Amino acid sequence: MDEFAQLSRENFEVFQRYGDAIGPDPRHRAIAVYAAPGAPTTYVEEDLQLEYLPAFFEARPSGGGGGGTAPNVGAGGEGTTQAAASLKLVVLDSRLESWSNSFSSLWTSKDVFLRLVDVMNMNPSALWLLRSEYDGFHHFLSSEKSGSADTYYIGTSNFVLIWTFDRRCGPHPHTPTHTQTQTHTQTHALWILRQQQSINSHAPAAWFLHVLRRHQDHVRSPFLLAYAAALGTCCTFDGEIAYRAHVVRLIERQTGYSTHSSSVGIEERLGVQSLTVSIKEVGQVLNHNANKERHFRLMGNVLDFIAERAVPEGRGDDREVESTKRLLAAVPLLRSRMHASEEYLKYLKERAERLSTVLFALLTHEDSATHAELADASRQIAEAAQRDSSSMKTVAIMTMAFLPATFFAALFSVPSLDWRPDPGQNVVQSNFWIYWAFTLPATALVFGLWLLFDHRAGRSGSHPSAATSGSGGGGGGSGGGRAIEEMEEDEGIRISRDYERPRSAGSRLYRRKSTSY
């Protein structure tokens, strides 16, 4: 094992996180495909408990036509090469235990997962990619020194697919003369579903398994899983692209920007909240488009690799070569499909960008309309206040007009004034002084209290930080601490001694000089 592979294995064993399985009886999907000459290909799919997964990988094909074993291997003519192939795949899950942790956890146990890795003869360098959550396509050649088989890695935002392909040749067990040889190909794979916020998180695995079942006859080819991953990704993206296009059409119809609603226009005014939600959705469409374009480039690299390494010289038997050629023949059609999806993504991206511009323009218009409404409301309030002021002025004028008459009417009605005195008596009675003795002091008391409260209110308003005076260092005067909060006015300009930072040394000297007066 080379140094990087050993470092990758040690780093994975130390830092990889593992989570608890969900449910009282957690099971994992396991798929087995067996093929032998003279018998149909067998596809077995079942749910296994966690502790049975290593045994599932270690089991060798035996006689029998089903139940997780390979069909009987038939005998061929003398001097021919008999072939048998098997593929075993386990579906695992990985999730973020918390958003504070940047790396996800494999929802399996450490011992079981490392046993699966050992049974696969996986190149440990692939563990570095898995631990670091790498995307892209990577191929690691087999190594006799480390005992690892050919290892392939495909990483996307939805899943990680790692598989090994091991080709073994030996004498046929049913020929005593050993004139026949048997080539057995073993493929072990791990499908790890990454946590993601997609429309349907189970769609990638469902499409991949569907494509794998439909192409199970090509189990002898080492590129079956690569082709299935590329085709399954295209099928998954078709549904997601259609959903994003539907979102864009709905927003276009709401804003009146759609060709189907251009003659009608905007049916109703969109508020700031609605426009903000639409801008967020359009932004998500643009992000998903960029992600899809990146994955289409990735799958293009996978197909390029299949085309370059499809039929290696001097390796494999006739059935393996035939399966690979049939997969290779389907690559141009898959490329054409990917190209059509990429072109539609470009078109959808242009629509989303133009729609985003329209939404920002509508948001600016709505913001201006809101400010206009606020200005109109302020104007109405000012007009209402002006009308109230006019009403109060009218009331005050009317009060001033009737106040002298009211005063004299009240004064002349007091009992101390007798307007029909008896002969020899005056109109003003002798106890008339009592009225003034109470009225004048009471009036003086009311005005005195008003002046007192008004003076105290003025002092508390002009010195809001008087409680902090005298605290702090640098000066023992009573006004030293209060100078931190007070604002001074010099030639009509209010200057803060401690809060306003001068822009230059000259302005600092000028400010100190101006505040020293």
Image (cartoon, rainbow, N blue to C red):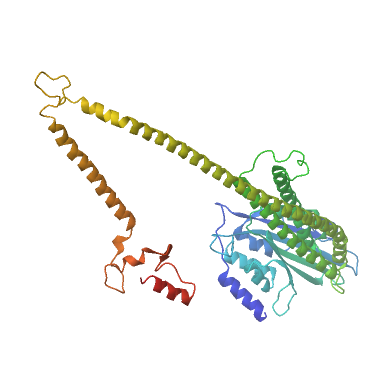
Rendering quarter of residue 33: bottom right
Q: Residue at x 42, y 34 (%)?
A: 391
Residue 238 showing in the rendered view: yes
The residue closer to the viewer here, 5 or 401, is 401
The residue closer to the viewer here, 245 or 272, is 272
Residue 175, percent from left and from top: 84, 68
Left or right, 180 with respect to 445, comes to right
Q: Pick whichever, 20 or 231, lies toward us.
A: 231
Q: Residue furthest left?
A: 424
Which quadrant holds the C terminus?
Answer: bottom left
Q: How many marks?
A: 0
The residue under the point 68% across, 60% down is 159
Quadrant containing the N terminus is bottom right
Query: Residue 371 at x, y = what percent?
Result: 57, 47
Most foreground residue, 37 or 284: 284
Q: Is residue 316 visible?
A: no
x, y percent for residue 47: 65, 53
